[in-house]
Image (cartoon, rainbow, N blue to C red):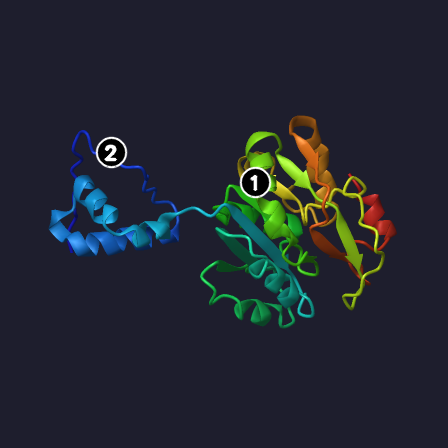
Amino acid sequence: PGITKLKPRPGVMRDFRLTVDYPEDLLLLRIVLRALGPMASLDAICQYLDQRPHLRALNRLPDITFYTCARNAEPWVSEAARSVLFSGVPEMEYIMVDDGSTDRTLEEMSLFATDPRVRLIVNPRNLGLASSSNIAIDAARGRVVCRLDADDRLEDWTLRKEWPAIKDALETSADIVYPPYHEINEFGGMEDPEPKDPRTHHHAGGAFMNRAFLNEMRFKDGLRHWDSAELNKRASKVGRIRYWDVPLWWYRVRPGSMSQPSPEREALRP
C-alpha cells in the first residue's frame, strides 16, 4: 500500500552483500520487509540478517550451475538429471530447458522441479541447442557453468572428488576445462573402456566454463549444428583452455544424435 524508504547510515558494514537480481533475492527481501515494516532501514535489515543466517542462505550464489537443454529426449533426460542431482557436488543449481518437445520430455523434467536446486524453463517454440544454451546461461547464477546434454550423464561421484581442483583451476588458471569422457551406447552400455580425448571433439557438453568468460563468448544464436566446435574455435583464440586427466562424464552414441555422420551436418562444420 505504501513505499518503504531505506535510510542508510554511515559506518554500517557487514561481511555479506545483499544483491537483488534473482527471484530468490526478492523472496528474501520480501521476508525482511514484512518483518520490519516501517522500521526498515539498511541498518535494521543488516541487524535482522545478522541474527538469521539461515535467511542469508537464500541469497547465497551457487558455486556451479549445471544445465540441460532437451528436445524429445524422453528416454534419457531423467537419467541425465539424476546424475547431476546425485553427483555430490555442493553449492550447485540445475537449470533444465525444454526446447519445444513434442513427447513427454517436459513431463519427465517436471518430476525434478520440486527439488529446490532445480529451475525449469520452457521455450515457447523450438530454438535449437545454441540458443537454448544462451537462455540457460542468462539464468545461471554459478561462478562455473557446465552443460550436460540430455542423453549424456555424469560419472557417479567422481566429479565430487575432482570438483575442488576444477573450481580452483577455473578461478586461477583456466577459462574452460575439458575432461575426458567414456562413450556409451543407446542402452547405456560402455562402447569402449578407454576414455576419449577431449581434444578430438571439444564437446561443450561435459565441459566446465568460467561463467564470466562464457558470458562474453556465448553460443552462436540460431546455430543448430557444431555449436561446441564453433564456440571452441573462438574461445581458443582468446581464452585459457585446460584439459583434465580424469574422465567425468559419459557421451551417448545413438542413432540420430550429433555423433552420427551426416553429409548435411558436415557441410555446416565451422
Rendered-image quadrant of the C terminus: top right
- Dividing the picture into quadrants, the one containing residue 175 is top right
Q: Residue at x 76, y 43 (%)?
A: 198
Classify residue 38 as left or right of residue 45.
Answer: left
Q: Which residue is mark 1?
A: 167
Mark carried by residue 72:
none
Residue 234 versus residue 151 in the image, above or below:
above
Q: x, y (%) of residue 98?
A: 58, 61
- Counting other residues with Cα less than 10 Å from the Cα at mark 1, is it few (<14), some (14-19), or many (20 or more)? some
For the residue pair 42 and 6, the one nearer the viewer reads as 42
Q: Residue at x 57, y 43 (%)?
A: 164
In the picture provided, is 204 more to the left or to the right than 123?
A: right
Residue at image mark 2: 13
Task: Choose top left, top right, bottom left or bottom right for residue 199.
Answer: top right
Please name the amino acid that badge 2 sits on: Met
Q: Residue furthest left?
A: 39
Using the numbered discs, state the Cα–Cα distance from disc 2 to disc 1 in whole angstroms: 29 Å
252, above or below 18, in the image: below
